[in-house]
Image (tube, coloured by chain):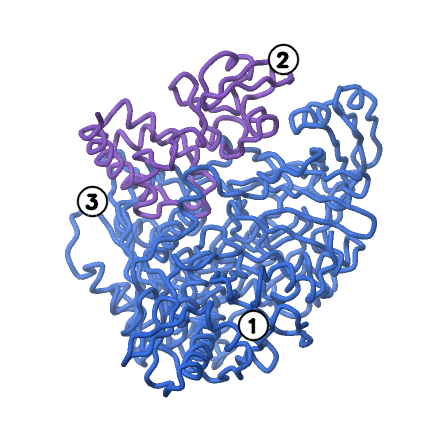
C-alpha cells in the first residue's frame, strides 16, 4: 500500500532508466503545455495529465484515461495520440488508468464525451511529443529540423536515412522546451484515424482473459451479498441472523447503508467464504423492514398523478416569440400526450465491488465509469462518504461489462467500503441480477404534453413541449432548487434546429422517491420519442411528407439539415414502398451528438409489425474508428428497440415487479433489424458516438408504423404484435 | 471432495454438491472467463461445454459435472485460435465483451454440429445468448466467417 504522491507514482511507473512524460496541462482552458519529467524529478504543478511515457529502454506507453466499457476508448483515445506521435498502436503498450491523481480529474467515461471533448488536445499531445523528438534528433545530427521526419516511432534524417528511435532520444528530448502550439497533421496523411483499425482489447475478450470488476480475485477475499428493502424507500428495522450465522462459512452479518444522491436506505450484508454460501445465508435472515409508507406506492397511481400534473403551468425552459399571444383557431392546432416508462440499465456484468481496508488506507477494485470520483477530492466524490483521505484511496479500474450510465454512480462502492471496514480481509460485494433489477436506479419515466399550431397559410408557427417527470437532479442532490427547471429533464426539446417562430418548453416536476440515474442518452431517450413523433403528427396535419415537412422547417444551413438531406438520399426516401410496408424518419440533436434514422417496417399477415431495416446517418465532425462507430450505432439501436417494445419497470406495493430477464426481457438475436450506417465526418464541431444512435430510433419506428398502418403510437413500450 | 475435469486438468474442490458449476469454476478453480449474468439460464453468459454439449453452468449442479469433461472459454483453444475466436477477432465483434465467452461457447457447438449454418440456424442456436451492447448483427456475420475458417482448417488438417 503506498502513498499516492506524484513522486512515488513516477518512480514506480517509470521503469528503468530515464522516462519522459508528455501530457496536457489542463489549467488555462486545456491549453497544451507539456512538461518534461525525468524519473528523479517531481512534478510540482497540480494539473498535469501525462498521456505518453517514453522510456530510454525503448518502451512506449500511452495511457487511456477513459474507462473501456465497450465504446472503444481503449483504442480510440490512444489512436488519436499515436497518429500525431507517428507510432502504430502495435508499437505501444496501452494502459488504462485507475484514477491516480497524476492523470487528473477527467478520468470518466460518459456523455459520449471521451473523444469530442479531447480530440484536439490529444492530437496536440502527440504532435508536440513528435516535434520535441525531431528537435532532439536534429540537434544530435547537427542538421535542420526540416530535414527530419517521424515515422513508426523513429526520427529519420531524410538525406542520409540515418535514424534514432524515440527511446534513444529520451535523454536529449527531456532537456528541451516543448512546443506549445505544435503543427497538426493534414488529415489526408492519417494512417490510423478514419481508417479500418483493430481494437487491441478484442483478443482479450475472445478467450476469457479480459478482467472485469466481477472477476477480481484478491488472496483471502471474502464474499458479500446485501439484503435491501424490497419496498424501495424502506429501511432496516430489526433482524435476526441466528439461522444465517449457523451456515458453515458465514463470517458476519452487518448493517450497511446505501447512499445514492438523496436516497438513503439501510440493508443487511452477509459476508461468507463464497458467494454461494453468502446467498444461502441471506435467505435465512429474518428481517423486519420499515417501509415508511412507501408500500402504498404503485406505478399505475403515479402515472395518473403525472397526467394530473400536466395541467400545471410548470417552470419555463425555453421561450421564443410568444405562443400564448397567437390565438390560433382550434382547427389549426393539434395537441397530444405522450408517455414513456422507467427502464433498467441491465449492464450484463452485474454490479460489484471489492474493497479492503487497512487502517486509514482503502483499496478498491471495481468496474466503474468514474475512476476520478472514486479517488478524487471533490465535494461529491467518494471520500466524503467513506471517511478516507483521497490520498489514501487506491483504485483498480477494470474493463467494464456495460456502463450505460449506471456506473456513473458510486453507491455500490460506498456500500462495499462500508462493509469492508468490518474486516481486515478484502471483501467482494456482488449484486445478483435480481438485486441489480429490483433496487434501481432506473431511467425516470417522462410524460410529455405537446401542442402545435399552423398559420393561415399552413406554416408551423407554434410549438409547445411540456415535460412532466421526476427530477434527476433532485434525485441526486436534495439541495437542488426545485423552483428552477431541471435542465436534464428537458434536454434538447428547445434546441432542435427546426425554425419555428414561437416555441415554449417547460417542466413540471413530480415528487419521486425511487433512485433514478442517467440511462444511455439520458432524457433524450424519451423526449426524442415524443418530440419527433409529434413533428410527424404535425406533418400529417399539414398533409405533407414527413421528411419534406422537416426540411421545410430547415431553410437555413444547419447540421440537422445536412444530415436529413443525406438521409433522404441514403434511405431512398422517395422510392415507393409496397402497400404492406412503411417508413418513418426521426432525428435528434443533443449534448452527445446528432443522428437521424429511417426505419422500414412490414405489416405481417397476422397484423404484427416486423422491423425490417434501419438507416442511420450519424454526424461526427471527425471520425476516429469508423468500424467502432458502426458497432456503437448498431448497438444503440438494439438498446432503443428494447426500450420501445419490451416491458419497462413497474412498481406495485412499493416493490419493483421485475426481477430478471424472464420478466424484464432484453432484445435477442432473432429480433434485430438490418442496420446500415452512414458516417458524416465533414469537419467542424466534433460530436459523440456512444449515445446519439439511440434517441432517434423509437420515433422513427413509431412513425414507420403510422405510415404502414395509420395507427399513431403515443406510449412506450408498445407491443409490435398489437399495434 | 468433488473431482472435476476442466480443460483437461483435474481439480479437487470441497464444495456443497448443490453449488452451481458456475461458482465452482469462478470462485474455487479461479477460471473467470465464464461469466455470471443472471443465474437463471436466461442470458447464456455462463455457457460451458459438458461432454461437448453447451450447458448453462449457472443452473448445473456441480454434482452433475463430477467426473465429466468440462471445457470453459479458456480451454476452447490453445492459442485463441478456434475458428470462432479467429472470426470474432477478424471483424471486432465484441463491445464490452462480457457476454462473448458465452457467445463463443454456444457458437462453437453450433459450428461443430452444423458447418454450414444459415442465418435462421444461427438465430435459433444463439437465441439463448443475450448481448446488452447489441452486437447481434456482428455475431451473425462472424459465425458465417467462422464457418469458412473452419472449412479451410479442416481441409489443411493432417
Asked if residue A294 lies left or right of residue A341, the reply is: right
Relative to A428, say whether B50 is above or below: above
User: Chain A in the picture: what colour?
Assistant: blue
Q: Are marks 1 and 2 on the same chain?
A: no
- State the residue at coordinates (38%, 85%): A145
User: Chain B in the picture: what colour?
Assistant: purple
Q: Are marks 3 and 2 in contact (CB under 8 Å)?
A: no
- Mark 1 or 2, closer to the camera: 2
Horizontal and vertical percent for residue A376? 69, 62
Q: Nearer the viewer, residue A412 or A659?
A: A412
Asked if residue A162 lies left or right of residue B27, the reply is: left
Does residue A552 appear in this view? no
- Mark 3 or 2, closer to the camera: 2
Split into 4 quadrants, where in the image is the C terminus of chain A?
Answer: top left
Mark 2 crowd level (few <14, some 14–19, many ≥20, 10 Å Cα):
few
Q: CA distance from mark 3 to mark 2?
A: 63 Å
Residue corresponding to mark 2: B1
Q: Are marks 1 and 3 in contact (CB under 8 Å)?
A: no
Mark 1 crowd level (few <14, some 14–19, many ≥20, 10 Å Cα):
many
Which element carries disc 3, helix, strand or loop? loop
Nearer-N-terminus badge (1/3): 1
Residue corresponding to mark 3: A580
Does residue A636 appear in this view? yes
Q: Nearer the viewer, residue A519 or A482?
A: A519
Q: CA distance from mark 1 to mark 3?
A: 41 Å
Q: Label 1 is found on which chain of the structure? A: A
Q: Nearer the viewer, residue A568 or A248?
A: A248
- State the residue at coordinates (34%, 80%): A148
Residue corresponding to mark 1: A317
Q: CA distance from mark 1 to mark 2?
A: 67 Å
Amino acid at each position: 500500500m503506498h502513498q499516492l504522491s506524484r513522486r512515488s507514482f513516477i518512480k514506480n511507473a517509470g521503469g528503468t532508466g530515464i522516462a519522459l512524460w508528455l501530457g496536457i496541462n489542463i489549467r488555462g482552458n486545456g491549453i497544451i503545455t507539456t512538461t518534461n519529467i525525468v524519473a528523479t524529478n517531481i512534478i510540482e504543478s497540480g494539473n498535469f495529465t501525462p498521456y505518453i511515457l517514453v522510456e530510454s529502454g525503448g518502451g512506449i506507453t500511452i495511457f487511456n484515461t477513459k474507462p473501456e466499457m465497450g465504446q472503444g476508448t481503449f483504442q480510440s483515445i490512444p489512436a488519436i495520440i499515436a497518429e500525431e506521435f507517428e507510432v502504430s498502436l502495435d508499437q505501444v503498450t496501452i494502459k488504462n488508468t485507475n484514477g491516480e491523481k497524476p492523470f487528473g480529474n477527467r478520468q470518466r467515461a460518459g456523455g459520449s464525451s471521451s473523444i469530442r471533448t479531447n480530440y484536439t488536445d490529444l492530437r496536440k499531445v502527440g504532435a508536440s511529443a513528435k516535434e520535441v523528438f525531431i528537435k532532439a534528433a536534429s540537434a544530435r545530427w547537427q542538421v535542420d529540423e526540416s530535414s527530419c521526419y517521424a515515422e513508426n516511432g523513429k526520427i529519420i534524417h531524410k538525406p542520409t536515412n540515418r535514424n534514432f528511435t524515440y527511446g534513444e532520444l529520451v535523454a536529449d528530448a527531456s532537456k528541451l522546451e516543448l512546443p506549445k502550439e505544435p503543427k497538426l497533421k493534414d488529415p489526408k496523411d492519417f494512417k490510423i484515424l478514419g481508417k479500418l483499425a483493430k481494437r487491441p482489447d478484442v483478443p482479450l475478450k475472445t478467450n476469457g482473459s479480459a478482467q472485469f470488476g466481477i472477476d477480481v480475485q484478491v488472496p483471502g477475499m471474502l464474499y458479500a451479498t446485501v439484503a435491501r428493502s424490497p419496498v424501495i424507500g424502506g429501511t432496516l428495522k430489526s433482524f435476526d441472523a441466528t439461522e444465517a450465522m449457523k451456515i458453515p462459512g458465514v463470517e458476519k452479518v452487518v448493517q450497511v447503508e446505501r447512499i445514492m444522491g438523496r436516497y438513503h436506505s439501510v440493508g443487511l450484508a452477509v459476508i461468507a467464504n463464497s458467494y454461494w454460501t453468502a446467498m444461502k445465508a441471506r435467505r435465512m435472515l429474518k428481517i423486519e423492514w420499515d417501509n415508511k409508507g412507501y408500500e402504498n406506492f404503485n406505478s399505475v397511481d403515479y402515472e395518473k398523478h403525472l397526467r394530473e400534473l400536466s395541467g400545471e403551468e410548470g417552470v419555463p425552459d425555453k421561450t421564443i416569440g410568444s405562443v400564448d399571444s397567437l390565438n390560433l383557431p382550434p382547427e389549426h392546432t393539434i395537441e397530444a400526450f405522450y408517455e414513456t416508462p422507467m427502464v433498467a440499465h441491465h449492464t450484463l456484468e452485474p454490479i460489484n465491488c471489492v474493497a479492503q481496508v487497512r487502517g486509514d488506507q482503502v483499496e478498491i477494485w471495481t468496474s466503474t465509469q468514474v475512476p476520478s470520483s472514486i479517488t478524487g477530492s471533490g465535494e461529491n466524490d467518494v471520500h466524503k462518504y467513506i471517511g478516507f483521505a483521497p490520498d489514501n484511496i487506491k483504485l483498480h479500474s477494470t474493463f467494464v461489462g456495460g456502463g450505460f450510465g449506471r456506473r456513473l454512480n458510486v453507491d455500490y462502492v460506498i456500500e462495499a467500503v462500508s462493509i469492508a471496514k468490518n474486516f481486515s480481509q478484502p471483501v467482494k460485494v456482488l449484486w445478483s441480477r435480481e438485486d441489480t433489477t429490483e433496487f434501481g436506479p432506473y431511467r425516470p419515466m417522462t410524460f410529455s404534453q405537446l401542442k402545435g399550431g399552423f398559420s393561415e397559410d399552413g406554416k408551423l408557427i407554434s410549438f409547445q413541449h411540456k415535460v412532466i417527470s421526476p427530477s434527476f437532479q433532485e434525485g441526486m442532490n436534495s439541495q437542488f432548487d426545485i423552483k428552477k427547471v431541471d435542465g436534464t429533464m428537458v434536454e434538447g426539446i428547445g434546441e432542435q434546429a427546426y425554425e419555428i417562430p414561437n416555441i415554449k418548453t417547460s417542466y413540471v416536476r413530480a415528487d419521486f422517491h425511487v433512485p433514478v440515474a442517467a440511462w444511455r442518452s439520458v432524457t433524450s431517450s424519451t423526449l426524442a420519442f415524443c418530440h419527433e413523433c409529434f413533428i410527424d403528427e404535425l406533418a400529417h396535419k399539414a398533409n405533407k411528407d414527413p421528411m419534406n415537412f422537416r426540411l421545410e422547417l430547415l431553410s437555413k444551413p444547419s447540421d440537422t439539415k445536412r444530415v436529413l438531406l443525406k438521409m433522404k438520399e441514403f434511405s431512398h426516401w422517395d422510392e415507393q414502398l409496397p402497400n404492406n410496408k412503411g417508413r418513418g424518419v426521426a432525428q435528434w440533436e443533443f449534448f452527445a451528438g446528432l443522428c437521424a434514422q429511417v426505419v422500414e417496417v412490414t405489416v405481417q399477415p397476422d397484423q404484427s409489425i416486423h422491423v425490417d431495416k434501419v438507416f442511420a446517418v450519424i454526424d461526427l465532425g471527425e471520425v476516429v474508428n469508423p468500424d467502432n462507430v458502426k458497432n456503437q450505432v448498431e448497438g444503440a439501436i438494439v438498446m432503443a428497440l428494447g426500450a420501445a417494445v419490451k416491458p419497462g419497470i413497474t412498481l406495485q406495493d412499493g416493490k419493483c415487479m421485475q426481477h430478471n430477464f424472464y420478466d424484464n426481457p432484453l432484445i435477442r438475436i432473432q429480433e434485430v433489424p438490418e442496420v446500415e450506417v452512414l458516417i458524416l465526418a465533414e469537419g467542424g464541431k466534433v460530436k459523440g458516438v456512444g449515445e446519439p444512435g439511440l434517441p432517434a430510433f423509437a420515433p422513427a419506428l413509431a412513425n414507420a408504423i403510422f405510415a404502414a398502418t395509420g395507427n399513431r403510437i403515443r406510449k412506450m413500450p408498445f407491443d409490435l404484435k398489437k399495434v | 471432495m468433488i473431482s472435476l475435469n476442466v480443460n483437461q486438468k483435474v481439480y479437487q474442490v470441497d464444495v456443497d454438491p448443490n453449488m452451481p458449476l458456475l461458482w465452482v469454476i469462478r470462485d474455487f478453480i479461479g477460471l473467470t472467463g465464464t461469466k455470471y449474468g443472471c443465474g437463471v439460464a436466461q442470458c447464456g453468459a455462463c455457457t460451458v461445454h459438458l461432454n461437448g454439449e453447451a450447458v448453462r453452468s449457472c443452473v448445473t449442479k456441480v454434482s452433475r459435472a463430477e467426473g465429466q469433461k468440462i471445457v470453459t472459454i479458456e480451454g476452447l483453444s490453445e492459442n485463441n485460435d478456434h475458428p470462432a475466436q479467429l472470426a470474432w477477432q477478424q471483424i471486432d465483434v465484441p463491445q464490452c465483451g462480457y457476454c462473448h465467452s458465452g457467445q463463443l461457447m454456444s457458437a462453437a457447438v453450433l459450428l461443430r454440429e452444423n458447418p454450414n449454418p444459415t442465418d435462421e440456424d444461427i438465430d435459433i442456436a444463439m437465441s439463448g445468448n443475450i448481448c446488452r451492447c447489441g452486437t447481434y448483427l456482428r455475431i451473425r456475420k462472424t459465425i458465417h466467417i467462422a464457418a469458412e475458417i473452419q472449412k479451410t482448417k479442416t481441409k489443411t488438417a493432417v
